[in-house]
Amino acid sequence: MRTFLLALLATAALHAEPILQVDFEADALGGYTQTLVQKEWPGVTWSNGLSDGRATIVSGDSVTGKAVRIAYPAKSFGPTLGGAQWRTFLSGNHDTVTMSYRVRFGTDFDFVKGGKLPGLCGSKCNTGGNVPNDTDGWSARLMWRDTAGHAVQYLYFPGQPGTYGLDLPWKVDGKACTFGKGQWHEVRTRIVLNTPRRNGLPALADGRITSWFDGQLALDTVGFLLRGEDTMHVNQFYFSTFHGGSDSSWAPARDVSSLFDDFDIRSGSPVLSAASKSASRPFRLVRTSNGTILSDRPLPPGTRLRLFRPDGQILSNSGGVRGTVLWKLEDLKGKLLEQGSSALP
């Protein structure tokens, strides 16, 4: 089985083709309406939050350009009262799909108990306590959890242990991944569907879910049965974000918002191709308004960026560092892939 999976992933990496990309750069500033959404996200027929004015195209920053801002009003929970939702259909029949986007929660964001974030799904895209069987669907959105904003994969799948989705916590080097307030994060998830029923043989629980948080491997787990039929594929992307949960204990105490940008959905796995292209343009380090130092473009999945002073002292990614900063792009085993320097004012 291990040999099969490695061969499958290597093949997928060589055939990673864009399906859908949305970066909002061509959109006018102002309300992000159902009409505008339908132009950029194929097949959208319904939505939550758009007619209420909770989605707005805004100027981002020097790193991201324009972005869509989503509002979560005070005391709101669930998609009818807060956040926004729509589902878009992906062209073609894909069994391996990788999606990524950037998200930034406001500096005063109130995480409360948790909330939903966009992700991939298939068939009926089961959510909301609708437990899938192996012929109707599945979903793999993200969530932030508890007041710290921990990142988890939130999975609905046949045979799940409860009525609601299963949390798969994201961790890097054993430490929980946390969404910082006022800070851009890149999230990336690859879904490899399981082997369906064929030639009288049962479906196999060999589906794989792999995720990266700011370019670092945060989840890699095999053993899921997401489908039973070979007519079921990764065929939808679910833009879904709101507080909750289904009662007021999940609701924020004040009006808060988040930004989303740079949605990229591809068939196959871009892991190898992204890493191989990493040297095409050097990284440039930029400083955010809260002092955090970030690269000006997403890190290739499965890599990490380390920062140093010119004398070799290792730096954290924040603090009042001025002048030349050296950086090294490494894989998760510490192998050097690329290095350079940036001048920070």
Image (cartoon, grey):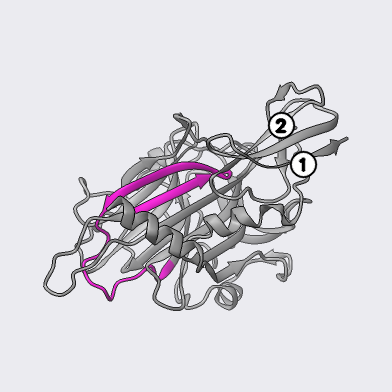
Badge 2: few (under 14), some or many (20 or more) residues near its Cα, within 10 Å? many
Q: Is residue 226 magenta?
A: yes
Residue 185 relative to residue 122: left or right: right
Q: Secondary structure at mark 2?
A: strand
Q: Is residue 8 above or below residue 27?
A: above
Contact between marks 2 and 1 (CB within 8 A): the answer is yes
The reply to whether residue 70 is visible in this rendering is no
Q: Amino acid at mark 2?
A: Leu
Q: Quadrant of residue 198?
A: bottom left
Residue 321 lies, in percent from the top left, at 80, 27
Q: Which region is colored magenta?
A: 208-236
Mark 1 highlights which residue? Answer: 285
Q: Nearer the viewer, residue 248 or 134?
A: 134
Q: Quadrant of residue 308?
A: top right
Q: Amino acid at mark 1?
A: Leu
Mark 2 highlights which residue? Answer: 307
Residue 126 relative to residue 54: left or right: left
Q: Nearer the viewer, residue 312 or 52?
A: 312
Residue at horizontal 63%, vertical 48%?
299
Q: Residue furthest left?
A: 200
Residue 186 lies, in percent from the top left, at 58, 48
Q: Secondary structure at mark 1?
A: strand
Of the two numbered discs 2 and 1 on the same chain, state the one appearing first in sequence: 1
Badge 1: few (under 14), some or many (20 or more) residues near its Cα, within 10 Å? some
Q: Nearer the viewer, residue 283 or 311?
A: 311
The reply to whether residue 265 is visible in this rendering is yes
Q: CA distance from mark 2 to mark 1?
A: 10 Å
